[in-house]
Image (cartoon, grey):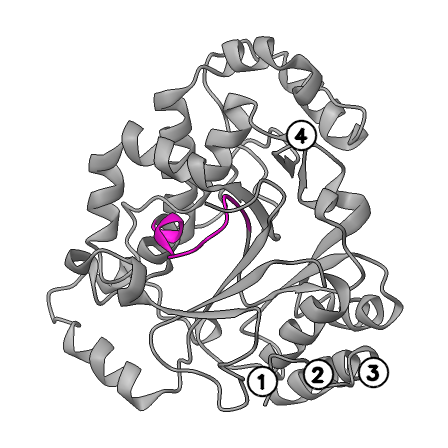
Amino acid sequence: MSNCNDIDFVITWVDGSDPAWQAERARYLHPDMPLDQIDFRETRYRNWDNLHYWFRAVETYAPWVRKVHFVTWGHIPEWLNPDAPKLHITNHRDFIPEQYLPTFSSHPIELNLHRIPGLSDQFVYFNDDFFLTAPVEPADFFKDGLPRDSLEEMPLLFTMPSLMNCVNTNDVIFANQHFRRDLCRGRNRSKWFSLHDPHAMLKNLYMTAFHSRYLFGLNIHHLPQAYLKDTFRQVWEADANLLDQVCTHKFRSSSDVSQCVFKFWQLMSGTFLPYNKRKVSKLYQAGREFNQMCESICSQRYKYICFNDADEIEFESHKIALNQAFEQVLPHKSSFEK
């Protein structure tokens, strides 16, 4: 049992260039699979060669973190120090039920994170494109035992068909199946209309004009996400059949839900404390906002960022420039490196 003040970080990583991983994935591809529903974009797997900066940032900007759980299919960066005191390398088979393995979709991995051996009751989930870029405190993620988050209504708006649009819709449908928007808003008005985030408050006030019991959508933010392990248990108890079905998918499917069902559960149940994500974080598009992103890394303008990869960029030159920005502020090896 972890201490109530313990906070762990969890990061998932895949080396898409690993021949063994590619060979195993190929064994599960079949000619009759609905390939239009499977996400094989190069941007999902290409390597920016900057994971070591993620670990340097954790050690520099969050020295208080109890443990870092590094979730991997089996491959490990050659520079990673497996004996680092705060590092726990966990293979998919260490925590994902056997009947779901192997998986080449992030969804079964994320839906089972609470099963990681030794995971703290409070943890922050990172994708490998989420980076700390300035000092953070535990209260940036948890306060009074509750995750920090921002509830902001945002109607779903899709301009083109895509697999992730389907998944986003499924996440909102899940929330509507388990919560009534009007009742949740009434029980937690101070969190729906919080002065901590005036932008979200005004948007939520505007949305009250729509007297629907159903959610139209919530802003996902796509940034490091604070979770209670108990939230995962509650959602599995509430809708085990749905999560089980998603976990059986070897590849992403248009019928999936994502880890956002846990975020939505915390928001709709009021199991969070509001704060203003816009003041401390930003999502950058690697294409049109690349220069601003590099500048914010060097200036420590935000506490954490996400950079969304993009198909249209000059990948090699962008990778060099991004890593130069990280090197400028994080030049020294961390204990996570050999």
Q: Nearer the viewer, residue 90 or 155?
A: 90
Q: Which residue is mark 4?
A: 273
Q: Which residue is mark 1?
A: 49
Amino acid type at mark 1? Asp
**Is residue 115 magenta-colored?**
yes
Residue sitting at x 80%, y 69%: 297
Q: Nearer the viewer, mark 4 or mark 2?
A: 4
| Residue 142: image location, x then y, percent | 66, 40
Q: Which residue is mark 3?
A: 328
Q: Secondary structure at mark 3?
A: helix
| Residue 234: image location, x then y, percent | 37, 31
**16 versus 156 height, above or below:** below
The magenta segment is: 112-123
Estimate how packed mark 2 is, as few (under 14), some (14 to 19) or many (20 or more) residues with alpha carbons within 10 Å.
some
Residue sitting at x 62%, y 78%: 313
Are dots 4 and 2 in contact, CB under 8 Å? no
Asked whether the viewer can see residue 104, the reply is no
Q: Quick one: label 4 or label 1, which is nearer the N terminus?
A: 1
Spatial CA span between label 3 and label 2? 9 Å
Q: Secondary structure at mark 2?
A: helix
Residue sitting at x 81%, y 45%: 279
Q: Quick one: label 3 or label 1, which is nearer the N terminus?
A: 1
Amino acid type at mark 2? Asn
| Residue 248: image location, x then y, percent | 19, 53
Q: Quick one: label 3 or label 2, which is nearer the N terminus?
A: 2
Q: Which mark is residue 251?
A: none
